[in-house]
Amino acid sequence: MFPPINEQMDLIRSGAVEIIPEDDLLRKIENSTKTGKPLRAKLGCDPSRPDLHIGHAVVLNKLRQFQDLGHISVLIVGDFTAMIGDPTGKSKTRPQLTLDETRINGQTYLDQATRILSEQRLEVRYNSEWLGKMNFNEVIELAAKYTVAQILERDDFSKRYKSGIPISIHELMYPLAQAMDSVAINSDIELGGTDQKFNLLVGREIQRAHGAEPQCILTMPILEGTDGIEKMSKSLGNYISITDSPREIFGKTMSIPDNLIIRYFRYGAFALEDEIKALALGLADGTIHPRNAKVDTAMRIVSRYHGEEAAKAAFEEFERIFVKKDKPDVIETFTFNTMQDKINIMDLLVQSRLASSKKEAKRKIEEGAVKIDDNLKIDAFEMIDLPNGANYLIKYGKKTFLEVKNSWNVFDE
């Protein structure tokens, strides 16, 4: 039923940052192989936002590997804990969501996660199933199993406390609530990013307090965003969503700094270890150009979520636009309906929604990032003709094309 134990451990270790404790996990796998009973590998995700990016896919892919080894993957959709908001890495209390909001986001998460997870050996649970049923007496009993001193060992809580930044009581309960997920589903191993280590360790303690064998912990790295500085995040705008179009995924991957190529190849494209070593060697000795490495990485990531044909088409379009300086196949159109004969270029960019403000439009023009009908010699205060039937092709930045038209009917009232 299961692959040999050494093969299982090799796959589980691959790409992982830490396994706690690894000896216990080895013992669990040995017992599982002897009894034929699959392990239960758990991953919790709080649907505080409605979409997933390829940073989330790092740990989801590891969960998929447990399925491939014959074990059961349990995806916990934290519709209840999302109402609290995971305080990990947060310098202030998060706004609270309603249960309806978290359930709507949760369904979106599930639809996206199953692009990576197999439907076989997958168990999906919503933690409102048990957390929503706890009465106040049970909450008090849970809180009694952990001390304030233990909670304040958490780095972000400790920093906020020392800085005098408020910490709400419900935030202190978050690790305990997540730990109850492990108790409720009899978790053998819990997965998470390195930033989740504290929460995962609390899960071991709360399982032990309930008389259960503590889960093992496996942490995965946090993938940097396309800026190469901060971790990938929707709020920072440095993300690649797994629901982005092939063109967007390809273009965003091509924009990453060269020093991130290996990490995106490993954790975004999930290349094999031998391929990763070969790429690292080629980049180091100059036999592989960084641009070619990015193309390969981008095509693999697009293929993973949209298929090989979409990846090929995204590559060809990228070549036309950025290498051959050609136009994309499909260009959006913005139509004015005005009788004015002229318009200031900054107003044109703002009204067509290319720029968010005149200040941004002026800056882009001065940077040479705006072309109108391939003309780069543009003055921000210039007035251009806008007669009935006018038609301009605007290139804004490196990637955005917009066809702007003016069309009005003299008989309109």
Image (cartoon, helix red, strand yellow):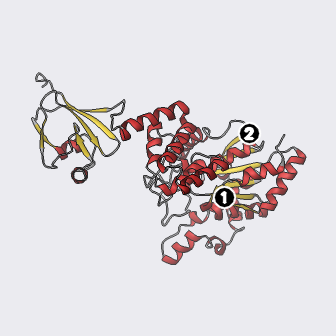
Marking on residue 62: none
Amino acid type, residue under disc 1 in the picture: Thr
Amino acid type, residue under disc 2 in the picture: Arg
Residue neighbourhood size for the residue with mark 1, other residues' Cα within 10 Å, grouped as few (<14), some (14–19), many (≥20): many
Tell me which residue sits at (62%, 38%) in the image: 114
Q: Looking at the image, can residue 217 be seen?
A: yes
> Who comes first in sequence, dot 2 or dot 1?
2
Residue 290 x %, y %: 49, 51
Of 303 and 97, nearer the camera is 303
Q: Mark 2 = which residue?
A: 121
Residue neighbourhood size for the residue with mark 2, other residues' Cα within 10 Å, grouped as few (<14), some (14–19), many (≥20): some
Reply above or below: 392 against 301: above
Residue 160 x %, y %: 51, 72
Q: Secondary structure at mark 2?
A: loop
Of 227 and 323, nearer the camera is 323
Is 232 positioned to the left or the right of 155 in the image?
Answer: left
In the picture, which quadrant includes the N terminus?
A: top right
Residue 303 x %, y %: 55, 37
Of 53 and 284, nearer the camera is 284
Q: Mark 1 = which residue?
A: 219
Tell me which residue sits at (60%, 38%) in the image: 115
Q: Secondary structure at mark 1?
A: strand
Q: Looking at the image, can residue 76 be seen?
A: no
